[in-house]
Each structure stands twice: as structure tokens, then as C-alpha cells.
Image: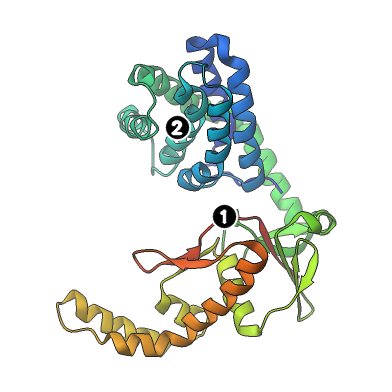
């Protein structure tokens, strides 16, 4: 189950390695071994989780990054050795989100922002920009064959589709991704290593925590499933009321109530709490289950958006 490619099938990981290694080789040639060690940890995260948002990648890479800094305290510019892969990855990620042809000025602007964010020395900026531009220009020639092979594999996978699957790498939360029976069996064989595995087959739902069978009430399971389908994010409390509980009319009424606040009218906060208390109660009960077993919980941020507080490996599989 390969990590998904984003925007125009541009393979970020390959480009990150190529560009970063050239910079390290030209600037810190005596530290290539340290770089390879750092990049190995970086690549293992990409291989496991796929091409994810730079902010989420940073959280996963940070612990390894910190340990390596302590391990190599006298290796010169640690920011280049350890955070350069994150910087290049972030630049390509941002570029891939641009629509239409990418200009050099856009790449320069993106590069400056990310270089500043990850504290890379400014003297490396021209080299980073030139290499990123070159990588984007050579992409059509170098990866045309690979893109065709990927499409062919996808077509074969559709024909062999055995189940639909949702993970942190799911491309479409509504329909999930398809996997073959062989891929399903590979996941099943390593179920004791997987923090959370849910299988839906023939109207029956099976829950496994590191291979051990567990159970949840239908409502808590429905809430958990919604978060799993949406990469750990669930929106605000009114969104959950509509999408998970199916109370569309009540949800719209509460949204109208909130819109009053934007017009500086008085908002009936008690009404909102009353209509959503059963949801917060279910979240509390589900969190007890998640915390006890996985040390993960569903929390809301300052904007009221609910999501898992930590990234963890999970699979939601629906046998077709």
C-alpha cells in the first residue's frame, strides 16, 4: 500500500532526497553519513504514513530529529543536516498546491518562507531555489513512465478490489481506497502490530487493538468511524450533530444561531449546549476507551474543531 502521490503525481519523497543530498554534498560533504542517518528516519515516516501535510510530518519527525541532534552535538550546522529534508519537503508540498504553471517567483517566495520557518541559513536559499526549479522542470521527462505505471497498477487494483480502506492516507473520505485480497491479508497478518484495526464484513463489525478483539456501543463506534474516515478530523460540534447523528434540521438551526453572533446579536449558548450535550457525552465515553488502550483522545482546538490529539496508525476496512 504505497504512499499516495499528490498534485500531478509529483513524487515528493524522491525529489526531497535528490535535492537535499546535492545541497549536503556541496556544502557539508564530510557529513554525508550523518545526513543519510537522519534521512533514513525521515523516509521511514513517509513510507509508513504517505505524503502528509508538512506540519503533521514535523510532529512525527521531531522526536527522531531531537535524538539525532543530541547524538551529533559537534557536527556543525545541525539545522541543515536534520531540518533540510523537512524544508525541501515543505517547499515541494506548497508548490504542488499551486494551480497552473509554477513560476520561478512563486518558488522563490515559497522557499523563503519555508527556509525562515525551519531556520535554514539564508546562504543556501539560491541553491535550494535553483534545484527545486530544476526538479520541477525535469519532472515530465523523468516521471512520465512512472506515472503511466502507477495508472496501470491502479486499474489492475480496481479489477482485483476486495475491500475499501480508510487510513491517514485515504485519498477520498467518502469512498475510501480499494485494496486487493492479498493486501487485505497482509494487513490482517500484522494485526498485532496495528494500534487500531476495524473490519466491517457482512453487516458485522470487528474491532482489534493490537490484535486483541474489543467492542464498542453503536453510537461510540459510529463516532469513531467518522473520525477514522476523515483522517482524524471531525469538524465542529454542529458538524458532528449533522454528519454522525443525522440531525440536519437541528444543526442548521444552531448554525443560524451562531450567525447571530457574527451580526453582534445575542447568541443562545444554552440552546447550543443543550442540543449538543449528548454528543459531548459520547465523546467523553469514547475518549475513556481510546485513552485507556491507545493513549489517544478526541479534543477540540481553540476554534472548536474536533480531532485526534495524536497521529497513530489505524485501518478501517469494509469488505466489498
- Label 1 – label 2 distance at C-alpha: 21 Å
- Residue in the foreground of this view, choosing between 154 and 44: 44
Name the residue tied to disc 1: 311
Name the residue tied to disc 2: 87
Residue occupying the point 62% across, 68% down: 290
Q: Within the image, what quadrant is residue 112 found in?
A: top left
Residue 237 higher or lower than 63, as above or below: below
- Left or right: where 73 falls relative to 300: right
The x and y percentages for residue 217 are: 66, 84
- Left or right: where 24 falls relative to 33: left
Sequence-first tag of 1 and 2? 2
Q: Which secondary structure, mark 1?
A: loop
Rendered-image quadrant of the C terminus:
bottom right
The crowd level at tag 2 (other Cα within 10 Å; few <14, some 14-19, many 20+) is many
The x and y percentages for residue 304 are: 37, 69
The x and y percentages for residue 248 are: 43, 86
- Left or right: where 169 falls relative to 248: right
Residue occupying the point 63% across, 34% down: 41
Amino acid at each position: 500500500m504505497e504512499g499516495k502521490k499528490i498534485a500531478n503525481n509529483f513524487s515528493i519523497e524522491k525529489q526531497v532526497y535528490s535535492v537535499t543530498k546535492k545541497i549536503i554534498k556541496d556544502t557539508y560533504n564530510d557529513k554525508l553519513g550523518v545526513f543519510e542517518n537522519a534521512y533514513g528516519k525521515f523516509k521511514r515516516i513517509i513510507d509508513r504514513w504517505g505524503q502528509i501535510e508538512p506540519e503533521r510530518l514535523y510532529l512525527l519527525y521531531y522526536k527522531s530529529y531531537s535524538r539525532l541532534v543530541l547524538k551529533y552535538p559537534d557536527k556543525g550546522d545541525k539545522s541543515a543536516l536534520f531540518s533540510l529534508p523537512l524544508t525541501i519537503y515543505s517547499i515541494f508540498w506548497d508548490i504542488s498546491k499551486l494551480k497552473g504553471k509554477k513560476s520561478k517567483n512563486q518558488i522563490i517566495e515559497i522557499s523563503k518562507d519555508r527556509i525562515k520557518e525551519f531556520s535554514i541559513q539564508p546562504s543556501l536559499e539560491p541553491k535550494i531555489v535553483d534545484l527545486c526549479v530544476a526538479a520541477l522542470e525535469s519532472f515530465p521527462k523523468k516521471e512520465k513512465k512512472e506515472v503511466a505505471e502507477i495508472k496501470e497498477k491502479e486499474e489492475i487494483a480496481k479489477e482485483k478490489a476486495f475491500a475499501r480502506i480508510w487510513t491517514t492516507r485515504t485519498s477520498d473520505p467518502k469512498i475510501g481506497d480499494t485494496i486487493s485480497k492479498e493486501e487485505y491479508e497482509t494487513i490482517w497478518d500484522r494485526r498485532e502490530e496495528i494500534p487500531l484495526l476495524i473490519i466491517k464484513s457482512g453487516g458485522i463489525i470487528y474491532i482489534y487493538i493490537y490484535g486483541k478483539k474489543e467492542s464498542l456501543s453503536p453510537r461510540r463506534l459510529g463516532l469513531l468511524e467518522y473520525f477514522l474516515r476523515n483522517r482524524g478530523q471531525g469538524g465542529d460540534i454542529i458538524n458532528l450533530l449533522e454528519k454522525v447523528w443525522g440531525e440536519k434540521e437541528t444543526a442548521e438551526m444552531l448554525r443560524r444561531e451562531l450567525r447571530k453572533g457574527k451580526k453582534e446579536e445575542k447568541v443562545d449558548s444554552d440552546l447550543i449546549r443543550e442540543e449538543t450535550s449528548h454528543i459531548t457525552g459520547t465523546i467523553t465515553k469514547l475518549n475513556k476507551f481510546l485513552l485507556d488502550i491507545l493513549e489517544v483522545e478526541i479534543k477540540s482546538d481553540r476554534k472548536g474543531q474536533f480531532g485526534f490529539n495524536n497521529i497513530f496508525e489505524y485501518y478501517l476496512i469494509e469488505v466489498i
